Amino acid sequence: MTSRLIVLAAGGTGGHLFPAQALAEALVRRGYAIHLMTDERVRDYGRAFPALETHLVPAATISPGKPHLLPGQLMRLYKGYQTARGVLERLKPAAVAGFGGYPSFPPVIAASRLKIPSLIHDQNAVMGRANRVLSRFADAVASSFPTLGRLPAASKDKLRYTGNPVRGIVLEKQGAPFHAAAADEPFNLLVFGGSQGARFFAEFMPQVVKLLPKAVLRHLKIVQQCRPEDIERVKAAYGTLDIAFELASFFADMPQRFADAQLIVCRSGASTIAELGVIGRPAVMVPLPHALDNDQLHNAEFFAGKGGGWVRPQAELEPQEFAAFLTRLRYQDAELAGAARAALALGMPDAAERLADLVEDLAARATMETIQK
Ligand SMILES: CC(=O)N[C@H]1[C@@H](OP(=O)(O)OP(=O)(O)OC[C@H]2O[C@@H](n3ccc(=O)[nH]c3=O)[C@H](O)[C@@H]2O)O[C@H](CO)[C@@H](O)[C@@H]1O
């Protein structure tokens, strides 16, 4: 009889934890108990995670440019391996699923050593460093996009396209009807970075908004996520303009904010892209620059390439030009509605179920092999 316990392992930011949470929700519905292995940031982003227990695993991000830090980082990862191995030996889960980030490293390696079936899920269009290494140890590699860049050749046969799972609160807004605002109707602009916010928007957007024509400002409502240290500054800047606005460092009801928006200006982290698709909203994406694998640029190019929005690299942005761009879009109801439709066509609302199927297949296959031995 297969154990009804699954261990999920993920780095502690929203980008890794939210897809893991979505899989956990699907597996709990199928009668499994979930244990989570992650890091301290789970306190911020893991509050709604349906885990029976959360295990903090020592881990370290390997920084290739700083070789002097390597011995300490490897020591920490080894400690993480010992912790993860101890927990897995005790729990004997049916399978382990890793979602990337270095905290998923020790549990997936330990699972492979203990011959517990494992899979890794990559959220981005190009594979992250931790997952590239782990792909050699895991039994399956699940991808969020139809193709997965930088997947090691040796792991190509393990690839399964599942999509990037989104949480239940996102599915509740799946395909929410898009209302293109006429010139005299309220226009909701949502601006946000990733799970941790983006300082760039706090600096750039107030400069843009003050250049917008009065006719646009009159009907504009901006909902903007700002890092805690930026909120007062942005509030003061918007306060001098006659516009409706709402600022917060984290909107817990983000799916509702998506549904209300006519246009979204955002980074292009993987969950952001997945949610834009499931809810179906047009976005102007400003990928996080200087990322090691440039994952956000690839995510955004895929989404924009299918008509869901526009990619605007941060280095090329200039307030006057961006204000003119937003002003033009503001009145292009048909273009915005078309982009909303194209976005929706990219959504994978059943990604969590597909991934849950894969977990169950792996677990069942391992049980069959044990019985046959
Ligand atoms: C800086 C960084 O390392 N970013 C990476 C991180 O993104 P990051 O952790 O920023 O995550 P994503 O963009 O993938 O997701 C952001 C999530 O936060 C939610 N949200 C955001 C703001 C808010 O106020 N409320 C709220 O709920 C969004 O709805 C979404 O679910 O992991 C992603 C997945 O590996 C990568 O693609 C990103 O490159």
Image (cartoon, grey):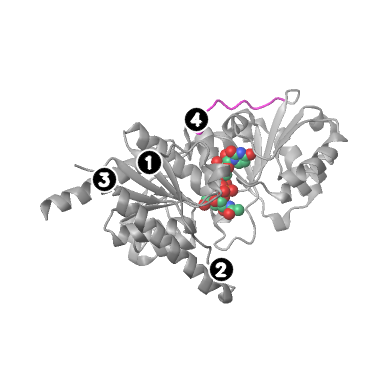
Three-letter code, disc 3: Asp
> Which residue is rendered at x = 64% and y = 27% of the image?
180
Sequence-wise, the earlier of marks 4 and 1 is 1
Label 1, label 2: how far apart the Cα atoms are: 31 Å
Does the closest atom of ligand 1 sit within 8 Å of the Cβ of label 2? no
Q: Which residue is mark 1?
A: 34
Q: Is label 1 in a helix, a strand or a loop?
A: strand
x%, y% of residue 177? 55, 25
Sequence-wise, the earlier of marks 1 and 2 is 1
For the residues bearing labels 1 and 2, Cβ distance under 8 angstroms: no
Q: Which residues are magenta?
A: 170-182
Circle nearer the viewer, 4 or 1: 1
Label 4, label 3: how far apart the Cα atoms are: 27 Å
Sequence-wise, the earlier of marks 2 and 4 is 2
Q: Is label 4 in a helix, a strand or a loop?
A: loop
Q: Which residue is mark 3?
A: 361
For the residues bearing labels 1 and 3, Cβ distance under 8 angstroms: no
Three-letter code, disc 1: Ile
Vertical comparison of 65 with 3: above or below: below
Q: Is residue 370 left or right of residue 214?
A: left
Three-letter code, disc 2: Ser
x%, y% of residue 213? 83, 35
Please name whichever residue, 300 or 72, is drawn nearer the observer in this view of the structure: 72
